[in-house]
Every structure is written in structure tokens, then in C-alpha cells.
Amino acid sequence: MKRVFSGVQPTGNIHIGNYLGALRQFVELQEENECIYCIVDMHSITVPQDPKELRKHILDVAALYMAVGVDPKKSIIFVQSDVSGHAELSWVLTCCSYTGELSRMTQFKDKSRGKESAPTGLFTYPILMAADILLYDTDIVPVGNDQKQHIEICRDIAIRVNHKYKNTFVVPDGRFLKAGARIMALDDPTSKMSKSAENIHSRISLLDEEGKIKKSIMRSTTDSDGEIRFDLEEKPGVSNLLNIYSAFSGESVDEIVVKYAGCGYGDFKKELATITQEALVPIKKNFNEIRQSEELKNILINGAERANTIAEKTMKRVKDNFGLGF
Ligand code: AQP
């Protein structure tokens, strides 16, 4: 059995990019692996958050994990700040990483662009993410494509530590899906779909109402040539919609292109809206039940206890190998 770890930031409502890139894998992997799924609240404060909203979003993300099919009987679900090992290991790894490698992270460059000075936490975000993963002797990390660089730096740090000290960490592998690995913003297909983008029509959140889903898809950016075909360079908007269609319908992009040959964008978008609306109906229904249930907080408390048992063992090994304490 392999150990799987991943997380989502409680920075807003989970969108179809998070779902198609990461959460769908969470559900699939829990059948044959030991899975640990975290709500990474400490990552979310790398940019300012409203405390009340943050607490609400933490429970929303927990409920959404379960609404899409993560089963707390099979997987551990917990909140990052409930297990102190994440912060502790993060400091140790900070001492084993270099400003040069952190400066190359595209997510940091994107999020700090145009600012004279950026929060230090934004800069060291990949180290906290490495700590999350290495704390649980993780074999597999299911994530979207945008996290490839962060998985690489995590592997580099683990290999570096293992080389310098005794074999301390399991070196993890990222797991990226073909369909859905990188869903782009509907209003700008050159940027990835994001929870915190200002324009709500740039994304489809899993809890969006049907009217909003249709509106966002119908007004999505395409091009003026009118042909439905996959071409990331020339037609990024249409290609993104084809990817979403394929991920929800299970049909290949080639099949969809053949199906819509000679059709206009309007018909294609209308059908994509219907497919997306239908896929989200059961998720919304499950969410409403789970979010109101008394059980939700108990699941997180129990999850944190189970996660902590594993984390403490790793931290003991880290301290022994580094010579910390006496
Ligand atoms: N657009 C995307 N397409 C495919 N996968 C995506 N993921 C995020 N955006 C896309 C994957 O979702 C998981 C959780 O992401 P996160 O919440 O930890 O942070 P993020 O990548 O920064 O996501 P957002 O939505 O863009 O949040 P904000 O706006 O707060 O920064 C990860 O596995 C990620 O790869």
C-alpha cells in the first residue's frame, strides 16, 4: 500500500480546476492506498485572509472533500494547523533550502509580480508544502500541473537531506492527470483558473448555481475564427473548453471535435454548460447535507489525531538525524 498526501487551500470555494486537477484523484486513490488529505490553512495566510471567512472556508473545503467522494472511513481528513509538525518541519527544511531555488518558483513570481516587496511566507510557501508532504512519508502527491515545480523542489530537498544526514525522508512522486491537469481561467485562457481571481466569471465553483455556470461558460473568451478544434497556441480558449468538456464527459478531445464539426461556439458552449451543471448536481446536494452535519468537526478532530500520530514519528526521526534536542 502506498501513502498518498495532498491538500487544498481554504481560500474560497473550490472550482472545477481544483476538482478536475486534484480532487478527482483523491477519490480514485483512496480505494487502494493509505490517503491523507489536508485543508492547508497555514498556506492560505501567505496572503491576508479575513479570519471569519477563513474559518468558514476551512469547514467548506472539508465538506467539499466529502461531497466529491473522499470517505473519512478510508482517508484521513484534517486541518493543517491542527498538527504542529507542519510548522516544525518547515523550519528544519528552511535551513536545508536556498534562496536561489525559491526565487525560480513561477507561482511566487506570479503572485508577487508588480510588488516592490512580497510577504516572506509567499516566498517560503514551497518549503511548507515540502514539509506537509515529507511529514507523512508520502509516496504519491496527486496535484494539478501548476504544482509540478513545487513537487520538484520538495524532491530536491528530500534527496539533499537524505544525502547529508541519514536516510530521513521518503522521496515522493507527483501524480498529474492528463485531462483536467490545468484548467485555465474562462475570461483569460492564458492564466490558470483560480479561487482568488477577482472576476467570478473566470471560474466555475463547485457550488455555483446553474444560471451562474451557464453565464460563465457562455461569456468565456474564445476567438473569432469560429472553428472548434484543439490548438493551445492559436485557440487557447476553445482548447480549454474542450479540456473541460472531455474531463466531465469522459469523451476524448478528438471525439468531441468530430462531434461538433461545423457547429458554432454557441451550441458547443450550451452543451458544455449542461454537462457541467449535471456533473455538479450531486456534489452540491452532498455538500449541503455534510456541511450542516454535527459530525463534520468530529471527523476533523479525529483526522488530526491520526495525522499527528504519523507526524510525531517523523519528527522524532528528523530530530534524531539532525541532532536536535538531547
Ligand atoms: N486551474 C487549475 N487546474 C487544475 N488543477 C488546479 N489546481 C489549482 N488550480 C488548478 C490544483 O488544485 C489543488 C489545490 O490548489 P490550492 O488550493 O492549494 O492552490 P492553488 O493551486 O493556488 O489554487 P487556486 O485555486 O489558484 O487558489 P488561490 O487562488 O488561492 O491561489 C492543487 O493540487 C492544484 O494543483
Image (cartoon, rainbow, N blue to C red):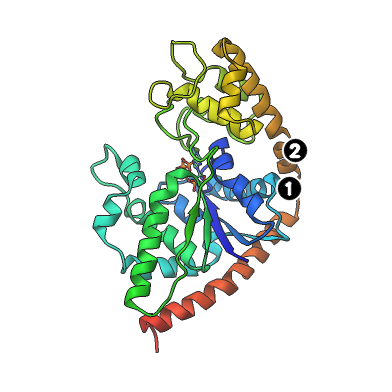
From the viewer's perspective, is 164 left or right of 36?
left
Q: Is label 1 in a helix, a strand or a loop?
A: helix
Relative to 71, residue 208 above or below:
above
Which residue is rendered at x = 52% and y = 30% of the image?
A: 203
Compare marks 1 and 2 and give the one earlier in the sequence. 2
Question: Any mark on residue 285, and which?
Answer: 2
Label drawn at residue 290: 1
**Residue 208 position in % (x across, y down):** 63, 31
Q: Circle 2 — which element?
A: helix
Q: Is residue 318 or residue 141 the one in the foreground? A: 141
User: Would you place residue 318 above or below residue 3 in this image?
Assistant: below
Task: State the image coordinates of residue 184 (x, y, percent, origin top left).
Answer: 47, 32
- The N terminus lies in which quarter of the figure? bottom right
Can you say whether 39 is above or below 145 in the image?
Answer: below
Name the residue located 56 percent from the left edge and 21 percent from the top edge.
257
Kind of residue at badge 2:
Lys
Left or right of 235 on screen, residue 297: right
Quarter of the C terminus within the rendering = bottom left
Q: Is residue 72 left or right of residue 222?
A: right
- Kind of residue at disc 1: Ile
The answer as to whether callout 1 falls within 8 Å of ligand 1 is no
Query: Which corner quadrant of the image does residue 223 belong to?
Result: top left
